[in-house]
Image (cartoon, helix red, strand yellow):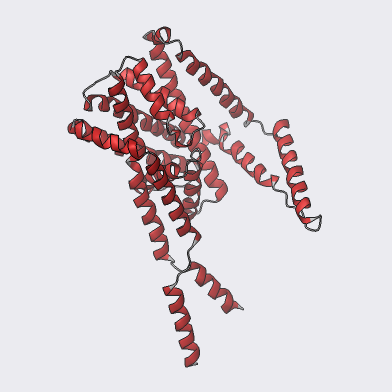
């Protein structure tokens, strides 16, 4: 008995001294590596930002920092209200770190915002939300995002027509035409999801996916294994779209839904004011309506660009747009870099620290979950 006890102690010591590398820990290091690669690629930009800070007015910079914090709080309020639509109530203080973590993951692993959403879906499991419910939450958040941006673009267009900016810069018409085209597609899809029956196109896609995966599986197994219908996963996603964007469902939760939309507007508005303050911080002030228009056009470029994280698109687009509106090249570039600093670079280290703490807390709560589950299985045998 004593020998067995000693052997158990030795084995537990061995596990304690040589813990296995869990998938979550590997993912943390992988995302950290991605962030370091992004920093390495844009290191010269960071050097320019640091030099700009030494020359900028610190009183204005203090206000900009406050706006950056408010922007993330507004994002956390958006998360809260979207979750209330799904019947889950979480304090804003618990969701505030998520605003930084999701942004950090999206920057480290550029994937059109999907990487951060995948993390958030996994995080919400601790509150009892299933993957499907987490997916519908992400869809609602994206919906409020595009609705808010649509509002900003319409206001910007009205400003540009009232000030005859479109006449002076006819190239802006391409922005407007592209926005109208994409808006028509989005509205058409929204009304398509109101149909109770599955559309012909959706049915054809699901049938095609089933045939494709069926043939692929049979080719691999030489028809010796049962075929898994992977198209069912696509069907689940399609049903989540229909349920999430259903007008009657949205009416039931109209209060939190419209508040989620409001808070996404506040995220954008805070960033517009940040650009306005930055122009004063560097000693080349612009009027507020110009800051509003420039931010909206640059945001539109970033959203439609197929470049991860809009790296290069944001910097080049904003600088050129500011120059086209009469801002000298050097101040235009400085405004671009500083806005990029507060909306992209500065949240990155904060997000990394919070991300590390999140995983650290998980490991403290159950550091040897895999070993414990393995030992319980052995005991049951």
In the picture provided, is 208 more to the left or to the right than 243? right
Residue 282 falls left or right of residue 244:
left
Q: Position of residue 97 (x, y in %)?
A: 36, 47
Location of residue 157 (image quadrant): top left
The residue that appears at 50% across and 52% down in the rendered structure is: 122
Q: Position of residue 261 (x, y in %)?
A: 43, 32
Instruction: Name the residue at 31% across, 23% down.
Output: 332
| 249 and 338: which is toward the camera | 338
In front of the other: 300 or 40: 40
Residue 208 shows in this picture: yes
Q: Is residue 379 left or right of residue 223?
A: left
User: For residue 160, what is the image quadrant?
Assistant: top left
Residue in the picture at 56% in, 26% down = 186
Q: Name the quarter where the C terminus is drawn.
A: bottom right
Q: Position of residue 292 (x, y in %)?
A: 35, 22
> Does 247 appear above or below 215?
above
- In the rendered image, the vertical position of residue 377 relative to residue 134, given as above or below: below
- Res 70 seen here: no
Where residue 128 appears, as percent x and y from the top left, is: 50, 54
Comparing 187 with 60, the one in front is: 60
Q: Residue at x 27, y 19 (%)?
A: 286
Count the numbered circles shown: 0
Instruction: In the rendered view, tell whether residue 217 sits above or below residue 136.
Output: below
């Amino acid at each position: 008995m004593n020998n067995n006890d000693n052997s158990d102690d030795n084995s537990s010591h061995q596990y304690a001294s040589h813990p296995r590398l869990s998938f979550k820990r590997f993912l943390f290091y992988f995302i950290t590596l991605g962030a370091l690669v992004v920093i390495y690629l844009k290191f010269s930009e960071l050097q320019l930002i640091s030099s700009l800070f030494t020359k900028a007015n610190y009183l204005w910079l203090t206000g900009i920092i406050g706006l950056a914090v408010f922007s993330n709080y507004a994002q956390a309020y958006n998360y809260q209200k979207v979750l209330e639509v799904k019947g889950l109530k979480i304090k804003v203080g618990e969701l505030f770190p998520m605003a930084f973590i999701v942004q950090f993951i999206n920057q480290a692993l550029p994937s059109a915002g999907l990487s951060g959403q995948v993390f958030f879906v996994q995080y919400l499991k601790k509150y009892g939300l299933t993957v499907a419910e987490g997916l519908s939450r992400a869809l609602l958040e994206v919906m409020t995002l595009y609705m808010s941006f649509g509002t900003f673009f319409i206001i910007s267009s009205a400003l540009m027509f009232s000030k005859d900016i479109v006449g002076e810069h006819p190239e802006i018409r391409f922005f407007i035409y592209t926005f109208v085209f994409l808006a028509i597609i989005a509205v058409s899809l929204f009304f398509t999801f109101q149909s109770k029956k599955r559309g012909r196109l959706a049915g054809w896609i699901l049938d095609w996916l089933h045939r494709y995966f069926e043939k692929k599986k049979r080719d691999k197994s030489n028809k010796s294994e049962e075929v898994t219908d992977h198209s069912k996963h696509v069907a689940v996603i399609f049903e989540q779209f229909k349920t999430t964007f259903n007008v009657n469902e949205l009416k039931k939760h109209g209060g939190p839904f419209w508040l989620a939309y409001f808070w996404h507007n506040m995220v954008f508005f805070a960033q517009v004011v940040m650009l306005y303050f930055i122009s004063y911080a560097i000693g080349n002030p612009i009027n507020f309506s110009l800051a509003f228009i420039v931010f909206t056009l640059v945001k539109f470029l970033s959203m439609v660009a197929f470049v991860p994280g809009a790296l290069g698109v944001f910097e080049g687009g904003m600088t050129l747009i500011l120059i086209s509106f009469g801002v000298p090249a050097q101040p235009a570039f400085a405004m671009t870099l500083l806005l990029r600093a507060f909306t992209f670079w500065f949240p990155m280290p904060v997000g990394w620290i919070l991300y590390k703490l999140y995983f650290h807390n998980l490991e403290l709560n159950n550091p040897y979950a895999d070993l414990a589950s393995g030992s319980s299985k052995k005991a049951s045998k």
